[in-house]
Amino acid sequence: MDPKYSVLPQGIQPDESSPEWLSKGDNTWELIAASMVGLQSVPGLVILYGSMVKKKWAVNSAFMGLYAFASVLICWVLWAHRMAFGTHLMPIIGKPEQAMAQNYLLSKYSHYNIPTADYVFYQFAFAAITVILLGGSLLGRMNFYAWMIFVPLWVTFSYTFGAYSIWGSGFLQPIIDFSGGYVIHLSSGVAGFTAAYWVGPRHSHDRQHFPPNNIIHMLGGAGFLWMGWTGFNGGSPLASNLITSLAILNTHICTATSLLVWLSMDMIFYNKSSVIGAVQGMITGLVCITPGAGIVESWAAILMGISSGSIPWFTMMVLHKKSSFFQKVDDTLGVFHTHAVAGLLGGILSGIFAKPKLLRMFYGSDKYGPGFLYSIIDGDIKRGLRQMVYQLLGAAFITIWNVVATSLICIFISKIVELRLHEDDLEIGDDAVHGEEAYALWGDGERDPPRFNRTPKIPSFCRRHGTNH
């Protein structure tokens, strides 16, 4: 509130809808940021998945994302949000409670000048995109009914535990994870790979030949994902401040660098400038900068982009093809490489490049960091090494928890319904699963040819005006 209006005349009450603690600027930005994260999923990933897969799986792949978005929201407000950010129950989880009471939603969130409702919505968008990213490993063969059960179980018993342990009041709070390199991306990559193991592979022909059905639409979905990351990382400070500005700029610097490096690697080793490869490089850049977006300098963002454009490229394009371990698991979109590898890389590099001043500005305390590089400069290597241990410990916990929790969830669901579609359905695709197809073109999925001898119906508006034209 403007200082000259901080004391109201006697008898005049402040507007109940705009309490004195509320910053309209911060509130507006946080709602925009949360909406941008939501748009990354719907329509961003819905379009990306629907166009990046073979035509016969376009509807199913897009619908998996749409269903997950709706399902997670209901779970989130009924119990999951407060498991991740509520009252302490155990060192790894909070007490499950609903997050819909007016007094709770309209109260000031912590020491920030925004209502709790903003934070609930923002964190829901994070939870939703995590599950949808995970689903990228399962496209082209998972039983949709199994997916309907999997989503709420995974959000409840896997995602909330990681979120509480690192972001809530859990035992891993000293870890630097600005916006979800571990909680979201390492988690989705590891869980997706694990679930892909239990679900099983695609149809043998699909696994060998799985071209995208619309590369132009794929680029449109990728564009939603890239620009939506402005809200993804820019919303984490929960305020419109200096860290927000730096986080947004660093996000785009790292992403552009990573895309160009991945593209260069493709051209050097395969003599082709692959559009799909450029999108993969874009994604790894977005993921890598996420744990350190607002707490590293821009030169470090460029170094992180170089790393995210080369190391995940190597694991996907070289190591994956040579490793029998990776070949055994059918990770449809390579989510393990683009999210688990890039997320782990970002977490480690954030532990190295995190600047003490930026850490204090973001976290409001000195218990985080400094980054290992700055600990060497300051002559306090022990603190830097301690932070690196925390970063590695966090990565280990997220990895182990997701492998175990995702495995148990898949085993449980398999006792109820088949995780994988039957072979006959796998040959047909969308029409067998949903009774719908992405493109209504005769000769490309229709059962019968059109009957040209039919007399066309006269449109009703023509009949009303007494004309057949």
Image: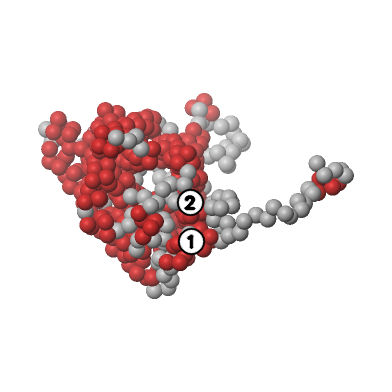
Instruction: Count the labels in the image.
Output: 2
Q: Name, please, the residue furthest toward the front.
A: 453
Taking the spot 40% from the left edge, 51% from the top edge, the residue there is 210
Taking the spot 32% from the left edge, 41% from the top edge, the residue there is 284
Q: Quadrant of residue 329?
A: bottom left
Q: Quadrant of residue 16?
A: top right
Q: Nearer the viewer, residue 57 or 401?
A: 57
Q: Residues within 10 Å of mark 1 (few under 14, many from 20)?
A: few
Taking the spot 12% from the left edge, 38% from the top edge, the residue there is 381
Q: Is residue 28 visible?
A: yes
Q: Earlier in the sequence, mark 1 or mark 2?
A: 2
Residue type at the position of mark 1: Ile
Label 1 close to label 2 by CB (< 8 Å): no
Per the model, the C-alpha gap separating discs 1 and 2 is 11 Å
Residue type at the position of mark 2: Lys
Residue 181: horizontal and vertical position, in percent?
31, 45
Q: Nearer the viewer, residue 128 or 361?
A: 128
Q: Secondary structure at mark 1?
A: helix
Q: Name, please, the residue furthest toward the bottom.
A: 415
Instruction: Say which residue label 1 marks.
Output: 428
Q: Which mark is residue 1?
A: none
Residue 401: horizontal and vertical position, in percent?
28, 59
Q: Is residue 116 visible?
A: no
Q: Residue 37, relative to residue 398: is it above or below?
A: above
Q: Which mark is residue 55?
A: 2
